[in-house]
Amino acid sequence: MRLIGNLKFNKEGLIPAIVQDADTDEVLMLGYMNKESLELTLSSGEVWFYSRSRKELWHKGATSGNRLIVRKLWLDCDSDTILVKAKPLGPVCHTGSKTCFFEELTKEDLKGSP
């Protein structure tokens, strides 16, 4: 718990948490944690977030069963982002995709935009 005091939460008390597959290094999703969800993640061994839209704690996979089992947590050099290395138990995205990052953005997508 010694490092939690060094974390730089934003003005809403949140910190971004990037989730990466512990075996493949594939980026799976981005969520936000508050101090309580981080403590639950560390104590339970499963990933918890704080839902900005619902304004409540969110146990990833609680309804779908597609939980994220924590392998390691890392802090970035500025202590303002967490990297969660986890083992996914099923698809991570609510769309059913393995990862939330499945749509490539290219310069072609910019054509015709204002």
Image: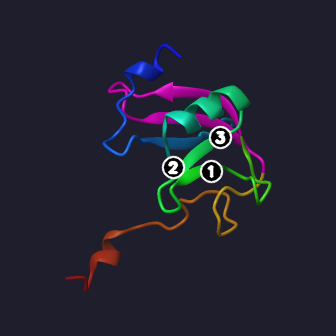
**Identity of the residue drawn at 59% across and 29% down:** 39
Q: Amino acid at mark 1?
A: Trp
Q: Amino acid at mark 3?
A: Val
Task: Quarter of the image for the C terminus: give it.
Answer: bottom left
* Mark 3: secondary structure: loop
Q: Pointer 2: what residue?
A: 31
Dominant secondary structure of the magenta stretch?
strand
> Furthest-bottom residue in view?
112
| Res 105 seen here | yes
Q: Pointer 1: what residue?
A: 58
* Mark 1: secondary structure: strand
Q: Which numbered disc, 1 or 2, marks the residue that appears first in the sequence?
A: 2
Q: Along the line of sight, which residue is nearer the eye, 87 or 50?
A: 50
User: Is residue 71 positioned above or below 86 on the image?
Assistant: above
Confirm whether the magenta stretch covers residue 72. Answer: yes
* Region in magenta: 69-89
Q: Are marks 2 and 3 in contact (CB under 8 Å)?
A: yes
Relative image position of residue 62 (x, y in whole percent): 75, 53
Q: CA distance from mark 1 to mark 2?
A: 10 Å
Q: Pointer 3: what residue?
A: 47
Q: Are marks 1 and 2 in contact (CB under 8 Å)?
A: yes
